[in-house]
Amino acid sequence: MSVEELSDGIFQIDIDDRKVLATRNLMPGISVYGERLIEEEGEEYRLWDPSRSKLGAMALKKFEIPLTYDSTVLYLGAASGTTVSHVSDILRDGLVYAVEFSPRTMRDLIQLCDQRPNIIPILADANKPQSYAHIVEKVDVIFQDVAQPNQAEIAAINSKYFLEENGHLMLSIKSRSIDTVASPKKIFKDEVRKLETDFDVEFEVLQRKELEPFHEDHLGLVAQMFVDEE
């Protein structure tokens, strides 16, 4: 077995004649969602299933992941915390604000936060960043995974509120949440154009790739934000 660090806190492990994605477990001995735990050279790793995580898929698709051990992150669309738990592993000296709209799902997220002190759960609508502006500080990275038709707008307004200048946006665009009929490629093109031209924050798209075979009709995107001074 061998362990390779792909980027800060994200690892690839050779096991059973295959390469698997993993993060170093912040809470050794505890599995979050039934994932396999592996010990190697005195460290415990949690296997990370990219078919259950857009961020995991982006890591395997060779995106430059702009997370470091001390990053501050706003995660929009946290759900029950499957991917958030891996972000928690990565941010060993950082913090993640996890926004989720569903009260039922939030109960599971709060249980996760009871185990992991670097996650702050927020029950809120990502369309209304003003409702949690008194909680969230400026962040280095926003990761967004929300099933809403106005995904580019949500990313832009949250970036304007919370993203540090020159900070990074990581966005999973779900085409079928925007239009169930139109071509996903056309939807992706339109959403990227909106992000680049339609809002009073300026983004430079650094990378974009479709997330198949892990997630059908999804586009992963990494952008950097610059503030329009006009």
Image (spheres, grey):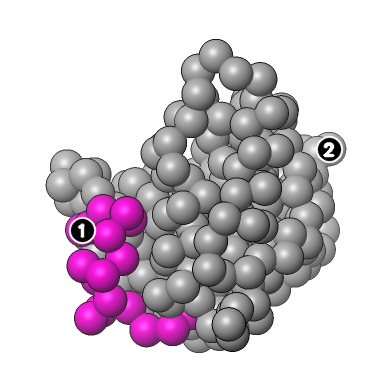
Rendered residue at 56%/30% (across/down): 175
Query: Closest to the observer: 87 or 103?
Result: 103
**Could you tell me how far apart the alpha carbons at marks 2 and 1 are, in whole angstroms?**
42 Å
The image shows residue 179, relative to residue 111, as above or below, that is above
Rendered residue at 32%/54% (across/down): 127
Image quadrant in which the C terminus is located: bottom right
Kindly report which numbered mark, 2 or 1, lies closer to the viewer in this rendering: 1
Q: Earlier in the sequence, mark 2 or mark 1?
A: 2
Instruction: Please name the amino acid that badge 2 sits on.
Output: Asp
Q: Which residue is mark 1?
A: 123
Rendered residue at 38%/50% (across/down): 77
Instruction: Please name the amino acid that badge 1 sits on.
Output: Leu
In the rendering, at what x and y percent does residue 225 appear?
A: 63, 72
Query: Closest to the observer: 198 or 216?
Result: 198
Query: How dense is the environment of label 2, judged by Cα within 10 Å: few (below 14), some, or many (20 and up)?
Result: few
Residue 128 in magenta stretch:
yes
Secondary element under disc 2, as helix, strand or loop, is loop
In the rendering, at what x and y percent does residue 148 appear?
A: 40, 39
Query: Closest to the observer: 93 or 216?
Result: 216
Secondary element under disc 1, as helix, strand or loop, is strand
Q: Are marks 2 and 1 in contact (CB under 8 Å)?
A: no
Secondary structure, magenta segment, majority class:
loop
The image shows residue 164, relative to residue 150, as above or below, that is below
For residue 18, the mark is: none
Rendered residue at 21%/44% (across/down): 102
Query: How dense is the environment of label 1, judged by Cα within 10 Å: few (below 14), some, or many (20 and up)?
Result: some
Residue 92 in view here: no
Residue stretch rendered in magenta on the structure: 123-139
Q: Which residue is mark 2?
A: 17
